[in-house]
Amino acid sequence: MADPVREELLALAAIYCGPHEWEVLSRSETDGTIFRIHTKAEGLLNADISLELVFHLPVSYPLCLPGISINSKYLTRAQCVTIQEKLLEQAEKLLSEPMVHELVLWIQQNLRHILNQPETGNGSEKCTFSMSTTMDDGLWITLLHLDHMRARTKYIKTVEKWASDLSLTGRLMFLGKIILILLQGERNNIKEYLILQKTSKVDVDSSGKKCKEKMISVLFETKVQTEHKRFLAFEVKEYSALDELQKEFEIAGLKKIFSEFVLGLVK
């Protein structure tokens, strides 16, 4: 992590030091840092609106835009998407310098104005998670490894719902204790999936208490190539033998990925 980013995170932790205002959700040398800020901003009718802002700072940040997600039970999905678009427009003006606090201050000062614009919309569907629109457009494929699933039935249903909501296709694959998730779709949507995976209480711990997924790793990701199969749906599959799983990868045009990343999990 670069020194300016480390300093920014320390400053944010000091600024948002109230109860539940600040939480680091995940930190990785390869995936960057994901954190959540709870704040309030003045909305219509002079009423304060609670906002949950989730930021994903990639390893190349601040030379690239952060991923931003908006969550508020007081706003519709259309309003959340508009707010996010406005934040990303503002972020483009601040590229190459730490910007998170500036973005939070900006939304606190401008939320009412944004909600007053006709194009924001006032549909009834509440905003639970909004799509990120960063600069990584295009179809991508990502391979994830999960260490375990204790609440398996609930976990599978949750993964299927996320994939459906984010228009992702691919496979959730089981071979003995090996659990793999192969996702195909817009890279922005895959990033949103990863944020959901790391920030939601999707499983239970050894005592049966709901917990977040802390043992997930990204094995591989790349833009879809001509030799890669286009998955038409997201399916859950269980394999009884290694060669069955290998065949799945070969059919998908991912033979090399299987050899480099999956075989090592079996040994």
Image (spheres, rainbow, N blue to C red):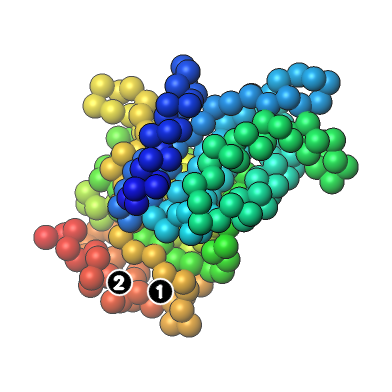
Q: Amino acid at mark 1?
A: Ala
Q: Is residue 237 above or below residue 165?
A: below
Q: Earlier in the sequence, mark 1 or mark 2?
A: 1
Residue 257: image tag: 2
Q: Quadrant of residue 203?
A: top left
Q: Is residue 52 left or right of residue 182?
A: right
Q: Is residue 183 above or below residue 249?
A: above
Secondary structure category for the residue under label 1: loop
Q: In 3D space, how far apart are the residues under numbered discs 1 and 2 (Cα atoms)?
A: 10 Å
Residue 252: image tag: 1
Q: Amino acid at mark 2?
A: Ile
Residue 92: image tag: none
Q: Dividing the image into 4 quarters, which one contains the C terminus? A: bottom left
Q: Residue furthest right?
A: 118
Percent coordinates x, y for residue 183 in the rendering: 45, 59
Choose between 181 and 116: the one closer to the eye: 116
